[in-house]
Every structure is written in C-alpha cells, then in structure tokens.
Amino acid sequence: MTVEDWLAALAAELHRRRIDPAEVVAEAAAHLRDSGRPPMEVFGPPTAYAVTVVDSIRGTAPPRDRGAPRLQASNISKRYGRTTVLTGVNLSVHAGEAVAVIGGNGSGKSTFLRICAGLDSPDEGQVRLRGTIGYCPQDGGTAGFLTPDEHFVLVGAGRGIRRTASIAQGRTAAAALDWPRGHAAKPARHLSGGTRQKLNLVLAGLGDPDVLLLDEPYQGFDNGSYLDFWQQVWQWRDAGKAIVVVTHRLAELDRADTVLDLSPRNQR
Amino acid sequence: MNRILVVAEMALREIVRRRGVLLLLVLLPLLFYYSRRDEAYWQSVRMVTLGIGFTLSTAALFAGMGARTMDPRLRLSGYSASQLYLGRLVALWAVGCTVCVPFFLLIRLDIDHVRYEAVVLLMALTVAVSAPLGLAVSALLPRELEGMLVLLSVVCLQILLNPDKTVAHVLPFWFSREIGTYAIEHDAGTGYVTRGCLHAAITFAVLLILVGGLSSIRLRRRAHLSTA
C-alpha cells in the first residue's frame, strides 16, 4: 500500500465516522514524510488508526467487543457496461448499529444494498451475513391487488409465522408509523404513496429479522411519519438489529452511528 | 406445503380482484366458441379450448409479471423459488378449472353427438398447459406487451397452421386438434387421444422445467453471499 493509498483510506474511514479528515490526514502525512517510514509500520492499518483517532477525539472508551458483524461487505465492486458504480466498497455492521449509506444519484447506493441482500451479484467482493434479513426496496415490493393484512400473512408465512400472529404484528408496527385508519382493508394500489411505503417498511421488519436493509424507505412520508420512522430505526437498533439505511438526506447523518459515503471520491 | 398454499391463496385473490381479466376469461372463449358455431359447429369445441388457453395463459403472464417486484422480497422472507411458482400455478389451475365448467355445460347442452369425456380431457390438458405457458413467457420477456403479442401469435399460428405440418407439432396447443378430432368425429380412433396426451404431457413437462429453471436462476442465492 503506497503512502497516498493509505492516506486516502484513512480519509475515507474518518469521513465514514463523521470526522473531518483534513487535519488528521495532513498531520499523518507530515509525520510520514518526516520519518520516511511506511505508513503500515508507523500507524498500522488505516481502519484501526481511524478508530484510535475517533476515540481520542471523542474521548470514548475503547469499543466493547460486539462480536462478529451481522453484515460484512468486503471489497465490493460493480460495473454496468463501461460505467463503474462501486469500487472496493467495505462495510461492517454490528448488532445494535445503524449505518447511513449516502451518495449522489447514480452513486450505486441501491445497487450496493441489493448486493448486500444477495439480489444482485457484484463483479468483485463478498458479503457475509449472520442472521435473517429484512429488505425494504426503494419502489415496488408490494402487490397492488392485495390488502395490507394479506401482505402481512404472505410475508409472515415465509418466516414461519401463523396467520393471526402475522396480522397482529403487522398492524402493531403499522400503528407505530401513524398508519391512517381504515386502510387495512384497502388493496395496496388504492393506498397513497406514503402509506404504501409504510407498508413496505412494516413488511421489512415483520418476523423480527436480524439485519434490516432499507432503501430510502421514507419516500412520501410526512414530517411526523418521518420522525416515527427514525424512532422505529432506533428501537430496532436498541433491540440489537443491524440496520443499513440508504438516504440522500444529509441532515440525517447525525441519526446514524456510521456513515458510508458512496460518492466516487470516497470509494477506493 | 403451507407456504405453497398461502402463495396460491394470495395469487387467487389477486386474479379475482382483476375484474377485467375475469371478464375476458369468460368472454373471449365464448366469442371463440360462437365464431365457428353456425358454419362449423364441430370446430367450436376446439376453438373454445383455444380461447381458454389464450386467456388463461394471458392471466398467467400478468400474474408472473406482477410478481416480479414482490418475489425477491418473498425469497428473502424464507420462500424457495419453487414454492413461489408452484403456488401461482395452483391458483391459475384453480381459476382455469372453474372457467371450464360453464363452457363444458354449454357444449353439453348446445352440441349433440360429441364425446363429452374427451371434451373434459381436452379442457383439463389445456388448463394444465396454459398456466406454465404464461408464466414461462413472463419469465422470458421483459414486459407485458411483448408477452401478449407472443401468446397471441401462438394462438393465431395454432389456428392457421396446417396441423399435419411438422412445425405445428411444436406449438403448445397442437394436442387440442388431436383430442378435439376424437371428441367430434365418431370414426376417429383412440390414436388421436394417445398422440394428443403425449404431446400435452411433453409440452407440460418442458414448460414446467422452463418455469422452474428460470425462476430458480432469477431468484438464486448469489455466490458472493455467505451466511453463518
């Protein structure tokens, strides 16, 4: 690994942890220049050094042992024809951790999530998953001619939940998202876009999956529902779920524990 | 088994709520039937089954296309690819059998001197083949319009092509000519039934393998993903 590569990797790791990398990277670069020694020898791997820096800045205790990550994506690369959308992307998400995946349009956020879910294949890289998975796609994912209750039964049966329990679980989760009254018996195609998206989100969490992959799940939500959504994410996090939320709203970054920026300049 | 039945139940609910599809399921075979009723009534038997075949395979096409966005979620929820397509097939077969009942009664009351048991066999085989035909087309083609045109072409060719030509044998409803001939011509031997059943069985098997293979490929577990 060259000095430049190591510094770029450090910058990406710091950025991911919501630390402005400029000053730290400049200091590290000066130290390396003065010492003339390779960065791996001086600082060790960039990820480990970034953790040390973040801990020293925030004054936190060393992280407790959280066990193996629930979701571990390693060196994910993906091309569509001649267009490269993902280059060497890494992500680890532990139980009780919420990660925001950000990036501009076409930066590969949804593709990355589909690769993590096993719905698309990368050109390179591996994903290791520990536990069951709940996936909320950006669009689709519901059947227009089925009612919400029927959706709960259908998805619940896949997870081995009985019919009545599925409906009860689904309705409880829907109520937490300020679900409009009287919509349980309407086919999904007659629901508003926001309500349909709430259904989509409820289906992702049905059956208590260990890993939740949510692709811009709040589209069409009003402000109250949007806040309810983040409350739901935090409840899942507190319950020990590993959550990945794709978003393009930068104001949300302080709501997540970790940020993965898929903008091309931040991919290695 | 429970998962297959739940998928079948939901697919059935979806089809029943598509009022336009239900109307066409009844109306189109009826039009096919009466198109030949006056001048060649014996052909009405074959035409009505082709009508059922076309509408049921079209319903299957729409069911298959409609499931495309839902299937990945269901796969991640614990369903296998085979549970998904078998559940949908069960629903389509149930719809097809239900649609056949009034048409069989129509033939029973409207046309004399027909081997009615052969008509039942013909309808049953048509229903059996139509459902996987529509699902196979939905898996092979990207949009509903293309699928509709393919199914329309198949039925048109089935009507227009000389059934003795070799190329006609590869069409999915060729068996309807054979069994239909046995149903309406009393001097026709059981060889027609044997050939028709053999053709239907091979067609059914090929379509089922195609649907199963394509579904398994589309919803396969990707090699890059490992679970602990």
Image: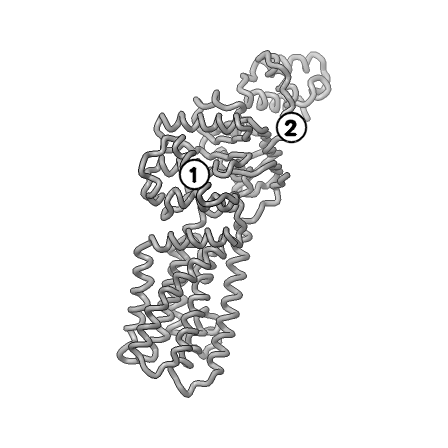
Side (left or right) of A26 relative to B156: right
Mark toward the viewer: 2 or 1: 1
Task: Where is residue B146? Give x, y as percent.
Answer: 40, 57
Q: How is the image coloured?
A: one colour
Q: Which mark is residue B176?
A: none
Label 1 Cα neighbours within 10 Å, binned few <14 / some 14-19 / many ≥20: some
The quadrant in which the N terminus of chain A is found is: top right
Residue at the disc numbered 2: A67
Q: Chain of mark 1?
A: A
Q: Chain of mark 2?
A: A
Going from N to C along the chain, the mark reached first, 2 or 1, is 2
Task: Tell me the quadrant of the picture where the C terminus of chain A can be found.
Answer: top right
Q: Are marks 2 and 1 on the same chain?
A: yes
Question: Where does the image place residue A211, in percent across and percent down from the top left?
Answer: 54, 34
Q: What amino acid type is highlighted by mark number 1?
A: Ala
Residue B47, percent across and down? 35, 73
Residue A65: x and y in percent read 65, 23
User: Of helix, strand and loop, which one carries label 2?
Assistant: loop
**Dot 2 amino acid type:** Gly
Question: In the shown orientation, is residue B39 left or right of residue B15?
Answer: left
Going 46% across and 35% down the picture, which residue do you hit?
A: A215
Q: Residue furthest left?
A: B38
Q: What residue is shown at x 34% (from left), y 43% (from top)?
A: A185
Q: Is residue A23 among the parts visible in the rendering? A: yes
Q: Is residue B78 above or below residue A36?
A: below
The residue tagged with tag 1: helix, strand or loop? Answer: helix
Q: Which residue is mark 1?
A: A168
Q: CA distance from mark 2 to mark 1?
A: 33 Å
Judged from this view, the residue extending furthest toward the front is A164
